[in-house]
Amino acid sequence: MKLKKLLFAAALFAVGCATVPQQAELPVYLNEDAPLEERVEDALQRLTLREKIDLIHAQSKFSSAGVERLGIPEVWCTDGPHGIRPEVMWDEWDQAKWTNDSCTAFPALTCLAATWNPEMSAKYGMAIGEEARYREKDVLLGPGVNIYRTPMNGRNFEYMGEDPLLASKMVVPYIQNVQKNGVAACVKHFALNNQEIERHGVNVVVDDRALYEIYLPAFKAAVQEGGAWAIMPAYNRYKGQHCCHNQYLLNDILKGEWGFDGVALSDWGGVHDTREAALHGLDMEFGSWTNGLNWGASNAYDMYHMAVPYMKAIENGELTTKELDDKVRRVLRLIFRTAMNTRKPFGSMNTEAHLQAARDIAGEGVVLLKNEGDVLPVDLAKAKTILVVGENAIKMMTVGGGSSSLKVLKEYTPLEGIQRYVGDKAKVVYERGYVGDVTGEYNGVKSGQDLSESRSAEQLIADAVAAAKKADVVLFFGGLNKKEGQDCEGADRSEYALPYGQNEVIEALVAANKNLVVVNISGNAVAMPWVEKVPSIMQGWFLGSESGNALAQVIFGEVNPSGHLPFTFPVRLEDNSAHSVGEWPGAKDVHYTEGIFVGYRWADKQQLKALFPFGHGLSYTTFEVGEPEVSKTAIKQGGNGKITIKCEVRNTGKREGAEVVQLYIGDKESYLPRPVKELKDFAKLHLEAGQSGVAELTITEEDLKFFDDKKHEWVSEKGEFTAYIATSAEDILYTVDFSLK
Ligand code: GLC
């Protein structure tokens, strides 16, 4: 019997080998055990000129062609940085009307940055990568890391704040974990896309120091540490050339200095010229308005700049296949890493794990800006009537804002989250307070909400005030709402103030009931003229599917907020450098005259006190940061010395919480102007009540360098430095002097 089984098994094995070819017998480009570069070269030499051209431009709104003859598949892209966009028509922006493409909307990236916790970034990247993988997408068009230069930029909510170090630390794990799913992250918009006004043509004029010290670092980290397989050049111009085909940014810096081996994939409609696209480092062209007659002309793919016109230029000898082959190598590398990678996980969609991830990120990103008195956390044993006011308490925010707009299975608004959380423990009353925007639709995705309101503005305030007088606590939800001009792609804000008369509502509410909490839902700083009168203020961000649940957990104290601001809240717009010495929005050119003095770097230089400073964030508990222990007070230039600064952090309150200890470095004297201090490291510690931990911060020579634009290189300069141990750009706890010998 045993012998029979053995013979049968042997026969099976023999047959098995005969039918499925072993990897080693496949052509090299199909052999997943072969080295990537060998697969690339093997595939390249099999391609005709036309097939090479087909690989480097779109065939539909979000896909590029493969090579059927060789079994090379299409490449499918999807927006966006906060979740997987619902399917659109082959040739149009309109909905394909699928019924299985709802997704999880994760918090906006400003919230992720505000967690100051790279573990949250890893969690984010894995979860969104699983959803992209499940939807069979090869390229995720995100994350975005354009620096927050001005609070007026409509797309800041999609990015990671004003500081290059924070954005660098927070973008890397996101990219690494998206790509663990066999999906390429496509970091964007490279570079200098810091406003929406005239975004398709404005020419940014910025000095090399600001370019290298402020605007490039997060992209460099995304490429060199994150290992991004794709990058999306921006619409705007730099040095007169469109970023989508820009010799300086794409060839000299990205591919030259940084050694990027992935694909530069144009923004949609960002390509304007065949010769420039061929020679200045673009690898894939999407969304062109080729015939120039109307935007997004469908079925014009052969007319794309890098389609037939490119092929013709090669055929008539104007251009060679040298640049084309480099593009094709990069596209093949992308395909082997994604679409032709059979060893990738299967992904998942709309899972409880993803909703939990969204809540975790939101809970760690919400920033408690002010909390005097005992309003927060709201104690349900005492608060028996809770009044919720504001349109942002009921308005869905996952729809809108531009290309990052999503179609979710369910979005819990703040009011719903509060009602679910409170249950029958208290009475929850709602008053509109103001009317902002009653629409709720983007590209055919409708929120389905009826936000119509017949009462006058005065009546709305009167009704809210009357309710406030009878409430134990009043929770106001306002801010912006991802509509045109209110944190939205394609438009910048027209004012720094809160829109829709919200200030009047807030003033009236706090006069009627001092137990007021203002929750600002936005991706940008806003003016707060009532800041002295309101005891509790929270920065709520656009939090996605779980908005209401996450906010309720923070408001009622189940979650202790531990977010810290990724950008400065100036008191007035004029306190922001782009609106004082800088230029915004500019005209044909926009001059970044402020140079490296962006955000807190400007506030320090001008000794301006912020409304709330960069890095600021409170907690429901208290912390004590002990004297720093310094491993040494000097490192040698050219050595690979490191100074370690350790601080004991104790949770001196009654409940668990997390603190973020920040390390800023100041160069006491330098031959070029430098900011007073710059963020160079940070540590977030989660501590139980009474528990203490050690924040470990390090300084290396790299951290001391600045970009010498004359030498065009990063340099360090011997001399004296100051290390600032802080819990925000204004809350300096200790300073430690050290030197570079
Ligand atoms: C948009 C955006 C970009 C987006 C792309 C596709 O114009 O600038 O972020 O990924 O086009 O929707």
Image (spheres, grey):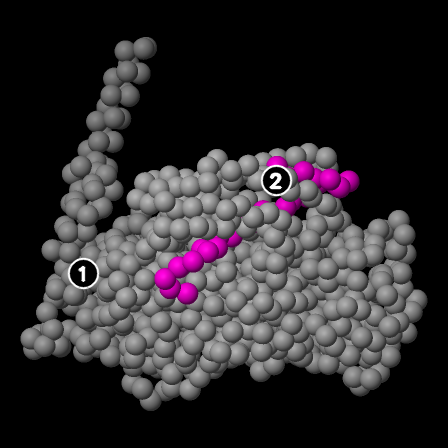
x, y percentage for residue 586? 44, 84
Q: Amino acid at mark 1?
A: Asp
Residue 705 falls inside the magenta stretch:
no
Q: What residue is rendered at 34% in x and 60% in y?
A: 707
Q: Amino acid at mark 2?
A: Glu
Estimate how packed mark 1 is, as few (under 14), some (14 to 19) or many (20 or more) residues with alpha carbons within 10 Å: some
Residue farthest to the right, as pictured: 470
State left or right for residue 471 relative to residue 31: right
State left or right for residue 470 relative to residue 226: right
x, y percentage for residue 123? 52, 47
Which residue range is magenta in the image?
A: 648-673
State left or right for residue 599 relative to residue 506: left
Mark 2 or 1, nearer chain start? 1
Residue 670 falls inside the magenta stretch:
yes
Q: Quadrant of the N terminus?
A: top left
x, y percentage for residue 545? 62, 58
Residue 368 to residue 478: above or below = above
State left or right for residue 149 relative to residue 75: right
- Under tag 2, what secondary structure? loop
Q: Using the rendered image of the protein, determine whether residue 420 is visible from the camera's viewpoint.
A: no
Q: Which mark is residue 631?
A: none
Q: Depth check: give the residue in front, 180 or 635.
A: 635
Image quadrant in which you'd find residue 15: top left
Q: Which mark is residue 326?
A: 1
In front: mark 2 or mark 1?
Answer: 2
x, y percentage for residue 485? 57, 79
Residue 344 to residue 576: above or below = above
Q: What residue is rendered at 42% in x and 86% in y?
A: 587
Q: What residue is rendered at 36% in x and 80% in y?
A: 203
Q: What residue is rendered at 46% in x and 45% in y?
A: 738
Q: Which residue is mark 2?
A: 627
Q: Depth check: give the residue in front, 111 or 35.
A: 111
